[in-house]
Amino acid sequence: MSQPSTNKITTAETIAEYLPSSFQNFLIELGSMLQFFIDFFKNLFKRGFEWNAFIRQCFEVGYRSIGLISLTAFIMGLVMTLQSQPTLANFGAESWLPGMVSISIVREIGPVITSLLCAGKIASSMGAELGSMKVTEQIDAMEVSGSNPMKYLVVTRILATTLTIPLLVILSDAISFCGSWVAVNINSTMSAMLFFNKIFAAIEFKDLIPSIIKSILFGFAIGFIGCYKGYNSSKGTESVGVAANSAVVTASISIFLIDMLVVQITNLLY
Amino acid sequence: MDSAIKTGSKTLENNVTSSEYVLEIEHLKKSFDDKQVLKDINLKLKKGENLVVLGKSGHGKSVLIKCIVGLLTPDEGTLKVFNKEITNLNEDELTELRRRIGFLFQNSALYDSMSVRENLEFPLQRQDEPLSEEELTPLIEEVLEAVGLLDAIDKMPSDLSGGMRKRIGLARTLILKPEIMLYDEPTTGLDPITSNEISLLILDIQKKYNTSSIIITHDMACAKVTNDRIMVLKEGEYIAEGSYEELENSEDEFVRSFFNSTN
């Protein structure tokens, strides 16, 4: 009975020997992430949800990011309009400006830029915080006391980012429109009523759905990667910095990958 | 060779029935990559006994107690806690078992974002039947009084000294009323006076809560105060066992070197 499994191991080991070590490490990391993903879902549905920790995380992730997101969104809308206005004016298409700005912000720029900012702010902070807890054995202490660190630290953080980042994206979109209206009124005059009418007339249901799906996935990816990197950091203070840095880089790359996939899929659907 | 010295993988003297042991380890092995950290460890802990495990840094002492609470999985051997093989337990059973074992970490591992009160409340609020605020307060006050730090109840861990952190760490484990206590170098980094206070506290806890304890240390003053029995590890191998006096006069140079350093 044991012969086939021995053969399998031998074959797998032989294949592994031929793979470059960097690729082997990549596969190991992928496997470890998959296990973390499974653990997250197993703990998500366990009895005794940590409501207090979840609400605190929503406050930390959502409320404390409002200032940063609002400022960058306003500048984003303003600059984008200022840059586009002369080109559209050359074609006599200035009236299309609100529509163009709204579609590009809602479909792409709003979710991606907001999520990239959150990856920098939130994923790094989660990576550093959990990494530090790992290094100082606080996570082990929770485990040996019969508490569930996965439920308390990880589930609450991932759910908080999954819920609050789409809300931040909506806020960011709205403030970008305001920035855009200010930019329009620097060179010409357009009433707020007319501007926002044009903005909302240009947006269709099919623009909103991919944007919301994207934002939810970005939020999940930011929380998941931040927690994964921190929770699995090795011992030593250096690993805290590595976890924070690696969380930002991986979360940023995954935002672009998810963006690419969602755009492809939603283009096929709509 | 001294009668107290036992070499290789011999099991410990067994003149008591198995039910009197709260912990039984046989032929335990653990490796990290190519390095074998624990090589055939055999250990039995009686109810109410304080066992001191001596050994140099990096010789597998902490790995041993991390295996006992399931933080690390042994490669080989049997590890029975309260007569249950720990490697065969599912997640819920392991959680249940861990609530009967207290673990004092070397650096106390206090939750630094929580106050002392919240640190103590944390494990209690995550029991199967969480306690109300009215039930929690007397329990918290009782354990803080036991470690002599009732005044620190609303302080943050960053406001505490090393010795105070150890005491709070101890209080946090005691609040679950463990039957086995595992101390990972409880006096490391403390001055001699505070070290002695912690050692005496370990003895008090043994008497008051009737706990069985494994005390991992290389502090001989702590070992002398707390031990009922001492076991010596060298490079992940069990090399000697006996009372403080027996091992002090051991013929084995490595064993004797621990005692020489204190004289």
Image (tube, coloured by chain):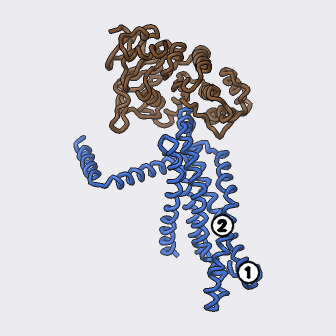
Chain colours: A blue, B brown
Between residues B202 and B102, which one lies in front from this camera angle? Answer: B202
Quadrant of residue B158 within the rendered picture: top right
Circle 1 packing at 10 Å, graded few (<14), some (14-19), many (20+), is: few
Three-letter amino acid code of the residue under disc 1? Ile
Q: Which residue is mark 1?
A: A186
Instruction: Identify the disc placed on residue A72.
Output: 2
Which quarter of the figure is the N terminus of chain A placed in? top left
How many marks do you count on the picture? Answer: 2
Q: Is residue A183 visible?
A: yes
Query: What residue sits 44% from the left and 34% below the top?
Result: B72
Circle 1: element type: helix
Between residues A258 and B4, which one lies in front from this camera angle? Answer: B4
Give the distance between the C-alpha atoms of the residues marked 2 and 1, in whole angstroms. Answer: 19 Å
Horizontal and vertical percent for residue A228?
A: 51, 49
Q: Chain of mark 1?
A: A
Marks 2 and 1: CB-CB under 8 Å?
A: no
Q: Are marks 2 and 1 on the same chain?
A: yes
Indicate left or right for A38 with B34 as reference.
right
Query: What residue sits 63% from the left and 80% below the top?
Result: A83
Q: Is residue B208 above or below residue A19?
A: above
Horizontal and vertical percent for residue A200?
A: 68, 78
